Amino acid sequence: MHACLFALALVAGDPEPASLSGIYHVSGEEEGQKYNGVAIVAEDGDKIGVHWCVGPFSTLGIGVRKGDHVALRWKAYRSGQLVGEGVTLYRIDGKRFEGSRMSGDEVNPEQMRFLRPLADKEV
């Protein structure tokens, strides 16, 4: 998980109590295969940075929050090489994200469920 922490630099500022910032369990489906991993969310006002760690992939995204929706543009890397990019649109329900992830011409479901807030040393 330490490799994922550099994504927190995508956005600055101290998270507010109502912030979405934290560590999340991520799950979804791509090309008929289910996946699970961890995501780190860092929020500053209406800006959001996300770093997903799923298997051998490290995916960095940045986007905007408007009300109960978050739109993100992301790039996926494997061993430091760009292997994909796309967009994700989530609807926020409490500290749960439900949405659709698009890569190429494929749209797939993805969810993130809050696990815990970020510790001071992780910010």
Image: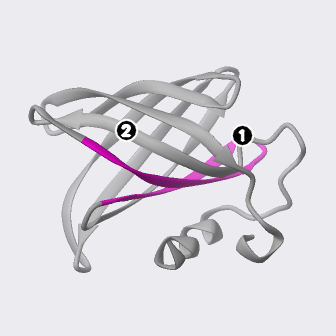
How many angstroms separate mark 1 from mark 2 (CA)? 24 Å
114 with respect to 106 (left or right): right
x%, y% of residue 57?
Answer: 27, 64
User: Overall secondary structure of the magenta stretch?
Assistant: strand
Closer to us: mark 1 or mark 2?
2
Q: Quadrant of residue 32?
A: top left
Compared with residue 120, is residue 35 higher up or lower down, i.e. above or below?
A: above
Residue at 50% over, 45% down: 25
Q: Residues within 10 Å of mark 1 (few under 14, many from 20)?
A: few
Amino acid bearing label 1: Asp
Residue 80 percent across, percent down from the top left: 26, 79
* The disc label shown at residue 46, or none: 1
Compare marks 1 and 2 and give the one earlier in the sequence: 2
Locate the C terminus and report the quarter of the image it occupies: bottom right
Q: Is residue 17 above or below residue 105?
A: below
**Residue at the spot 27% in from the left edge and 61% down from the top edge:** 55
Q: Residue at x 46, y 54 (%)?
A: 38
- Residue 11 lies in magenta, yes or no? no
Tell me the kind of residue under disc 2.
Ser
Span colored in magenta = 35-54
The x and y percentages for residue 10 are 60, 65
Residue position marked by numbered label 2 in the rendering: 27
* Residue 39 vertical placement versus 99 (above, below): below
